[in-house]
Amino acid sequence: MISRIDNGKLSLEVSSLGAEMQRLTSCTGVEYLWDGDERYWRRHAPVLFPFVARLCEGKYQLNGREYRLPIHGFAPQSEFELHKQTETELVYRLCDSPATREMYPFAFEFYVGYSLEGWKLKVDYTVVNTGSELLPFGLGGHPGFRIPFVPGTVFEDYYLEFSRPCRPDRVGFDDSCMVTGVNAPYPLEEGRILPLRHELFDHDAVVLANAAKEVAIRCKGSDRAVRVAFPRMNYVGFWHKDGLAAPYVCIEPWLSLPARSGVTEDFYCKGDMVRLESGEKYTNPWSISIEEG
């Protein structure tokens, strides 16, 4: 089911399947979210839970037992309940079920909230541990944005600009997109700018640690921009489908990283995952702001 909210400046459409954003449109008629063209990438903005990206051989372990999870966890393929709706807010809920417990043997409630405030879309992820055991999880967003979004421009006219100068490290991945544990400095122009070109993604995503917590997609000669802020996320990834001149880019705020190369991860031991005590609640907000000059 698709639900829609509108505040006069922005409108948002969201599917209950995966609590996934489908369209983000300004009052000037500009569409900012990727349209899901299957020639390039059929998704729009998946929600990543309870793991981000890939596990080694699709497996992890808990208390000596192996379990399997699909890439980015089961949230993208799960039907969420529409828990709350107003003119400018949507909140979706996913609870554990027999199907989720086969992959992830925990009791939980996972809420995905969207609210419009002026030219900003606020996104809130909330996880509640409704069980008696420690709840380990990873979390992340994966929105895709159309490029170009300024008439008469091409992909190479665009660049990513961090909100302040920084010295990020690129997270090392092997050919199967597993973490190698070997990171390397990733210089930015003027300490904050990454020009976009399709070849950036020939070896999958560029995932950065120690970067500024806000980044914008900008176009040369235009005031129009898309700004993503992720104050409590540890990593940010940039991606489009490799080997294609794909007309979009994803900005992916991640709390945690994929599995390590050659390691069947233990979710209680993997250092970048949240471990939530029984009865506790964890919230992680981020946002997308539109600038139209």
Image: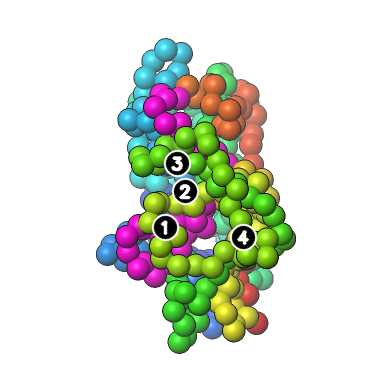
* Residue receiving disc 3: 173
Query: How many residues crowd mark 4 within 10 Å: few (<14), some (14–19), many (20+)?
Result: some
* Residue receiving disc 4: 188
Residue depth check, mark 2 versus mark 1: number of the one nearer the observer: 1
Magenta segment's dominant SS is: loop
- Residue 171 is situated, as x and y percent measured from the top left of the image, at 53, 43
Residue type at mark 3 is Phe
Q: CA distance from mark 2 to mark 3?
A: 22 Å
Magenta region: which residues? 237-265
Which numbered disc flags the more N-terminal residue, 4 or 3?
3
- Residue 136 is situated, as x and y percent measured from the top left of the image, at 54, 27
Query: How many residues crowd mark 3 within 10 Å: few (<14), some (14–19), many (20+)?
Result: many
Which numbered disc flags the more N-terminal residue, 2 or 1?
2
Which numbered disc flags the more N-terminal residue, 1 or 4?
4
Residue depth check, mark 2 versus mark 3: number of the one nearer the observer: 3
Q: CA distance from mark 4 to mark 3?
A: 20 Å
Outermost residue, left direction? 39
Circles 2 and 4: CB atoms closer than 8 Å: no
Query: How many residues crowd mark 2 within 10 Å: few (<14), some (14–19), many (20+)?
Result: many
Residue at position x 45%, y 18% in the image? 62
Query: How many residues crowd mark 1 within 10 Å: few (<14), some (14–19), many (20+)?
Result: some
Q: Which mark is residue 47?
A: 2
Residue type at mark 4 is Leu
Seen in the picture, residue 262 relative to 117 is either above or below; the reply is above
Residue at position x 61%, y 23% in the image? 278
Residue depth check, mark 1 versus mark 4: number of the one nearer the observer: 4
* Residue receiving disc 1: 201
